[in-house]
Amino acid sequence: MKITMITGPTAGIGKSLAYQLAERGENLLLIARREERLKNISEEIQNKYNVKVLYCVTDLTTQEAPKNIYNFCKEHQLDISTLVLNAGYQINTRLHEASIEDEEACLRVLGLSVIMQTKLHLNDLVKRGGGKIMVVSSIAAFAPTSKEFAVLYGPVKTFMNRFVEGINGAYNKDNIYATSVCPGFTTTEFHEMSGTQERMDKVPSFMKMTADEVAKEGIAGMDKKKEIVITGGLNRFLVNTLKFFPRSLITIIGNALAGGRYK
Ligand SMILES: NC(=O)c1ccc[n+]([C@@H]2O[C@H](COP(=O)([O-])OP(=O)(O)OC[C@H]3O[C@@H](n4cnc5c(N)ncnc54)[C@H](OP(=O)(O)O)[C@@H]3O)[C@@H](O)[C@H]2O)c1
């Protein structure tokens, strides 16, 4: 069965992506940790859109997760045609305050698991004559690195953008296209989960998008085989113009707009 796999569909952007992709008839394999949510969302999507939805409870912080997901696909004879690698969170402490295990787990979810899941499925995509990969990155990939917390978050998102570039360079000839979706501030559970809701509340509402808006732009960009999709006109303007400004000025502007995130 031809199917789209989505990591992190139990909340936020991933959940919106799941509903929007199902609405246009795509069968789904949903990957996350919270089983109750996976079950409820799967049932609701199946009933609403008449597509097949499977789920596989997985903690992407574990080293074996990518192989377990791949084996699940083989056992259930699922032909993944689109990989949506969206799951993520950030660590709300300074680098020296978090344990090495916590930093490693976060890097695995945001980075290594994205690479390993892509790598495992590439062989099948090449054999089947093509496929699509969406990585949900962030405009943090282009912004100055936070000096307070989540020091590794921006750098790993930059790495993911370069990874997407690398996949396109190496696999467009096999009809495989990768898209990096780079949202700015998006109203999801992300900030509450990472203990940064207070900072998010200080961000002016004109800077925030909904998960549905981000998902819609992301899917449209993926359909057009765009390599980078910066969601929202304001975010595109900021990323495209601020690169001509000195870093110090960007930090001042970033702090003014982003609730002191870059102090
Ligand atoms: N919100 C923003 O402002 C914003 C801005 C730029 C980029 N992003 C990026 O957008 C992506 C989605 O974030 P969101 O804002 O939609 O956050 P969210 O509402 O908190 O949703 C995060 C999703 O990731 C899953 N997840 C987290 N840790 C996981 C783990 N260890 N194993 C498996 N699944 C895991 C969660 O599922 P379970 O908890 O059920 O496992 C949940 O479905 C992330 O990559 C984030 O970096 C967000």
Image: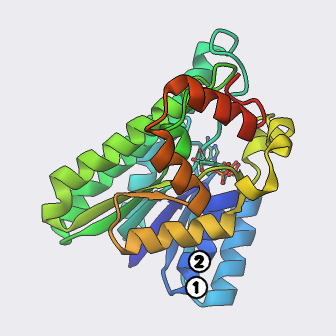
Tell which of 167 and 201 is nearer to you. 201
Answer left or right for 172 relative to 137. Answer: left
Looking at the picture, which amino acid does disc 1 mark? Glu
* Secondary-structure class at tag 2: helix
Q: Residue at x 47, y 33 (%)?
A: 156
> Mark 1: is the Cβ under 8 angstroms from ligand 1?
no
The percent position of residue 179, horizontal first and vertical second, equals 38, 59
Residue 82 in picture, x, y percent from top left: 39, 67
Dot 2 and dot 1 residues touching (CB under 8 Å): yes
Q: Dot 1 lies on which element?
A: helix
Q: Position of residue 162 (x, y in %)?
A: 33, 41
Image: 61 above or below 187: above
Would you identify the image quadrant in which residue 187 lies? bottom right
Residue 124 is at least partly visible in this image: yes
Side of 9 where 131 appears, left or right? left
Q: CA distance from mark 2 to mark 1?
A: 5 Å
Q: Is residue 40 above or below residue 194?
A: below
Which label was assigned to residue 23? 1
Q: Quadrant of the N terminus?
A: bottom left
Q: Position of residue 7 (x, y in %)?
A: 54, 55
- Residue at horizontal 56 percent and vertical 23 percent from the top: 248
Farthest residue in the top direction? 96
Whether residue 138 is visible, yes or no, is no
Q: List the residue tagged with mark 2.
A: 20
Q: Is mark 2 within 8 Å of ligand 1?
A: no
Residue located at (12% from left, 63% from top): 173
Above or below 131: residue 123: above
Within 10 angstroms of label 2, few (less than 14), some, or many (20 or more) residues? some
In the foreground, 158 or 93? 158
